[in-house]
Structures are given as structure tokens and as C-alpha cells.
Image: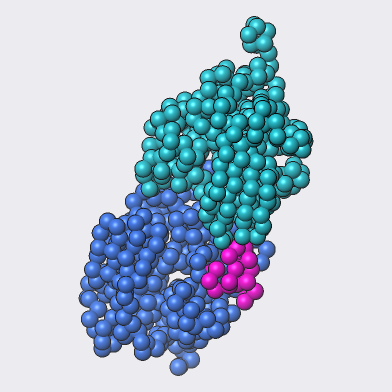
Chain colours: A blue, B cyan
């Protein structure tokens, strides 16, 4: 590493590492085969509405050119996206009636099995890092390659709580903010009450804990405060896949754009994340986000603020 | 009815009709036998923190003197409470782990089977009426005895949706506001999405529809607006019985106190209702409300407002 590269201005504001997958999704209304998915896909797309985003992930040589182009269309920097021989990660799942629950039908790790993320030099000094849902050891590996990021957010899922709890705890100790859904927070902490669960997460080190409740909104906890944010209410939910990733991506992107890091700024960024997620679920995959105009997003933010003001 | 009584100033601001029962409640933590319950008990107690409340209901001669005294302690006017020969209404139920679900074990209508509410003259000109959970025909009978109340709120439950749907629809047509929990709203309208469900309820006539989501907060719908209110988050839930009645009682009591009737005033009153309910569930029966000081309630309202402000 040369001195000049070390001090160069980063090419991106937000680095996001996570999964990239080809999903097959069935809801009570429809079924979509082999569509773009993965936590990094949703998060990068949402964050790209607000900030310069660099993606870290891996796909196989089978990964469709159309999806590479879609990332470009969102303006996502894909210098950190590795293309390696083999098949892209695949996931399939089915939503039950009313989409309250989903079952995973199959998971094929494929190229993810041997993935070792290597951050492009142009990413390393980025001030914001989102460790989206991926194995804790990969999250740690990415974190280790960053040069003192200003703010690090971590998301996870049940799989890692079950299979890599210690590694997950180790990464949580090193981040500024953790986001989990209510079930994951209960599962990880063994506490049913969300105040108790959040307190335990805060004790590990993060300054902020955001508990996502899907259509019921989200909660932000700090050591001395609780903030309550409902979800933007929509009539037409087509596919909830990736809603949490879209929320977190919209969150980190808008937080980076705003610049401030305090409770008020974080709640405001959660509001943007909630609106991004409300669009995301209106269609399968990234279809709605791909059509979304920044003006539409801003309009819904204002509509949301009126709903919250009473 | 004399001319003078017709024009006399009402003795109460809010009339509340509903059930009064002796409950046996079992939660994962404890069991309480033969404690005071019923929608009117919870609603009157909560409303009494804000306004002069007149109760309409029926109990048997077995109804303990201590419970009569408790109503008095809350300052509830019980001129409209009939005491008739026979047993008081009884209910027993058990909450499952985490108190997300409850099962009714037994219901004995007793004196409720032949109840015909007769409003004291001093109630009839009251400006606010809350038709709490009770059969729609009794709700209608009470409504018919009122002299043009300024604002009428109606609550109900699954039982009446199943057994008296037409009668329920007829009362709904005549009220200003309906409140149901999310399951009841879906059940009554046949619509899963809450925006669609609320729209159908609004089409029946009420200007305001409030959908209660328990720990996830409440939603207010008008023909051209939606307001989203989270619930006050508490760590210690002992007994959720009557939470919806306490919410609605705190709501109508504080609405009456405020005087204005518009969306903003209604959302503000929902906030007070939510805080009242958050206290109510911290102990069994009306035990927590009986100890509650108005200053504690106000303090939690301010705490809640800070949580909402972000």
C-alpha cells in the first residue's frame, strides 16, 4: 500500500458488504423465479438514493449481465464486487397467507462458500460502513480492512445467531449500531421484552440499537433514550423480501448524506429507511426501487411526516 | 320527564356503558381470582383521570362493596349502575406464554342476560358517550336515550361481530368514531389490509376510525388522512386484560377535557389513552390505576412525547 493511496479521498461515502443472490420467491399472489436478491443488493440500491455507495460481495460467472447493469443504473460502485468461477448464491422461499411468515425452501451457498472479501483501496477510507446480513467472520474481515470508519452499522439474521453466536458477539462489540428484527433480538439475547433485549445489546458496546418490527415500525435505543417510529402504512404489499435490508440501506445512505451522527439524525435516517422499504415491498426484487424517482421518495417522506405529526 | 330536568346541566361529561364483571385471570407469571373487570370498569377508571364520568351497567347483589367503593374512589358517578338480584357477570381466561394470545375459559352472563340500561336523567345531556364493549342492541338502547351527544365512540369485540353483525353495523352508522383492534377490524370488514378495512368502516358513516394494535400502537383514519401512533413501551407487563378499554377510556376522558374535536385533538387524546393503558397493564385488574397519581400520568405523557419526537 503506497502512502498516496492511503491518503486518497475515498471514491464512496458508504461501503456495504452483504449477500448477493438469485432468489425464487412465492407469495400468495405470485411467484418470481431467479430474480435479483441478497442483503447487499437491496441495501446498496436503497442507499444509492442518498449517497455514493460501494458494494462488497461475490457473484458467479452465471450472474446475469442485466443485474450488473442494474447496479450501475442505481449508480452503485461495484469495484468491490468479485466475479468468480462458479454459481451465484441462490435462495428460495415461500410466504404464507397474509405474508406474516415465510419459509426458506432452499439455500445454495455456491461462490459464497469460499468468499474472502478484499476491499478496493478506493473504499477503505469511506466514513460509513454497513455490515449487512452475511456471516460474522466475513463482516469482521471487512471491518478489519477499513481505515477507522466514522460509523459502522451491523445487521444479521437467525442463521448466524444459531451457528456463529460468538463470532457475531465479537463483531457487535466493534460497531456503533446494531439492527435486528424483534425475533432476532429476542433470540440473540434470550429476553422477550424488547427494552431488556436492547439493553443487553447496548452493553456489548454499540451506542445505538435499532429493533425492526416490519409493518409495526422500528425502535431506537440508546443508553438513556428510546425512540418510537411507526412504519409507513401501504395498501399494496407484493413481496416483503429484503424490506429490512432496504430499510437499513436507506438508513445508512441518508445518514451519510446528512453528516450528523446523533440520536435525532439517526431517527431521521430511520424515517428515510422506512420510506425506502415501503417502496421496496410494492413489487418483487428491486423492481420498484429501479423505477423510483427521488421526488417520489421525498413526497412520501413528507406524507409520512404528516402522519407522524398527527 | 319535566321541562326543568330536560334543560338541566348534565352531572357528567362522559357517559360510558359497558360490561362489569368479576374476572379470573391467569398469566404465565400469576393467577388472580375474582378480581374486578369488564370494559366499563376499565374505561370509567381511565376516563376519570380527566373528566366527570357516569357509568352505565349492571351488577348482581353479590358485587363486593369494595368494588363499589373503588368506583367511588375514582370519582365515577354510579347513578347509572343498576344492582339487581342475581350474580354479576363472570369471565375467566388464560394468557399463553409471552401474553401474545389469550383463551377464554368461561363466560357467565348472569345479570347481563336480562339487562336493560336506563339512563339517569342527569346523564342524558352529557356531551360525550362511549359505547364500550357490550352487545350492539344495548349500545343502541343507550344511544337512543341520549340527547344529541356531541361525540359518540363505539368499541366492540369478536363475539358481536360473529353473533350480531347487522345490529353492530346499525350502531356503527350512528357514531362519530369506531375503535376496534386489528383482528376485529379485519374480521368485521373481511379485509386484511388495515387501510382497506378502515376505509370500509368509514363508509358506514363514522368520521374517525381508530385501529388498536396493542403493543404496536394505534392508527387513526379519516376520509383523507392517516395518523400513526406507536404504543408507549414498558418493561413490566403483568396483565393485558382491559388494555383496549383503558386506552379508549383514557381517550374519551381526555378528549372531553380538551374540548376540541378534530384530528389533532383526537390523536392527542389517543396519546393519553395509550399512556393510561401502559399503566393499566402493569398490574392485574384496576390495581395499578387505583394507585396512579395524575402527576405520574402527566410525567409519562411527557416521556412518551420525547420518544415520539425522536
Residue A104 percent location from the top left of the image: 35, 71
Residue B102 percent location from the top left of the image: 54, 52
Is residue B74 in view? no
Residue A1 percent location from the top left of the image: 45, 93
Residue B43 is left or right of residue A119, and the answer is: right
Residue B154 percent location from the top left of the image: 52, 33
Q: In the rendered image of this protein, does residue B145 appear above or below residue A284?
A: above
Q: Residue furthest bottom?
A: A1
Q: In the rendered image of this protein, does residue A54 appear above or below residue B228?
A: below
The residue located at (36%, 80%) in the rendering is A57
Residue B200 is left or right of residue A136, and the answer is: left
The residue located at (53%, 56%) in the rendering is B100
Instruction: Name the dominant secondary structure of the magenta segment.
Output: helix
Is B2 in front, or is A31?
Answer: B2
Is A89 in front, or is B260?
Answer: A89
Q: In the rendered image of this protein, does residue A44 appear above or below residue A276?
A: below
Residue A112: quarter of image: bottom left
The residue located at (38%, 32%) in the rendering is B203
Residue B252: quarter of image: top right
Q: In the rendered image of this protein, does residue A287 appear above or below residue A163?
A: above
Give the magenta part as a residue range.
A185-205
Residue A201 falls inside the magenta stretch:
yes
Amino acid at each position: 500500500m503506497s502512502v498516496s493511496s492511503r491518503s486518497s479521498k475515498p471514491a464512496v461515502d458508504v461501503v456495504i458488504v452483504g449477500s448477493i443472490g438469485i432468489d425464487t420467491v412465492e407469495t400468495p399472489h405470485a411467484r418470481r423465479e431467479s430474480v435479483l436478491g441478497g442483503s447487499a443488493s437491496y441495501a446498496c440500491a436503497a442507499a444509492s438514493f442518498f449517497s455514493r455507495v460501494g458494494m462488497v460481495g461475490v457473484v458467479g460467472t452465471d450472474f446475469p449481465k442485466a443485474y450488473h447493469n442494474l447496479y450501475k443504473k442505481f449508480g452503485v460502485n461495484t469495484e468491490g464486487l468479485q466475479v468468480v468461477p462458479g454459481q451465484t448464491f441462490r435462495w428460495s422461499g415461500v410466504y404464507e397467507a397474509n405474508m406474516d411468515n415465510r419459509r426458506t425452501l432452499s439455500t445454495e451457498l455456491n461462490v459464497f462458500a469460499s468468499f474472502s472479501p478484499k476491499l478496493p483501496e478506493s473504499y477503505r477510507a469511506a466514513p460509513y460502513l454497513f455490515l449487512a446480513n452475511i456471516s460474522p467472520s466475513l463482516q469482521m474481515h471487512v471491518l478489519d480492512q477499513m481505515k477507522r470508519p466514522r460509523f459502522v452499522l451491523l445487521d444479521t439474521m437467525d442463521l448466524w445467531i444459531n451457528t456463529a453466536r460468538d463470532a457475531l458477539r465479537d463483531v457487535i462489540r466493534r460497531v456503533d449500531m446494531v439492527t435486528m428484527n424483534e425475533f432476532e433480538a429476542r433470540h440473540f439475547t434470550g429476553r422477550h421484552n424488547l427494552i431488556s433485549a436492547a439493553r443487553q445489546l447496548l452493553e456489548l458496546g454499540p451506542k445505538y440499537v435499532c429493533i425492526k418490527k416490519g409493518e409495526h415500525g422500528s425502535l431506537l435505543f440508546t443508553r438513556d433514550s428510546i425512540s418510537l417510529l411507526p412504519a409507513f402504512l401501504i395498501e399494496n404489499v407484493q413481496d416483503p423480501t429484503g424490506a429490512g435490508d432496504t430499510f437499513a440501506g436507506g438508513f445508512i445512505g441518508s445518514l451519510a448524506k446528512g453528516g450528523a451522527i446523533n440520536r435525532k439524525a439517526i431517527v431521521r435516517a430511520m424515517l428515510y429507511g422506512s420510506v425506502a422499504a415501503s417502496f421496496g415491498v410494492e413489487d418483487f426484487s428491486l423492481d420498484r426501487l429501479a423505477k423510483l424517482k427521488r421526488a417520489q421518495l421525498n413526497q412520501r417522506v413528507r406524507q409520512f411526516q404528516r402522519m407522524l405529526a398527527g
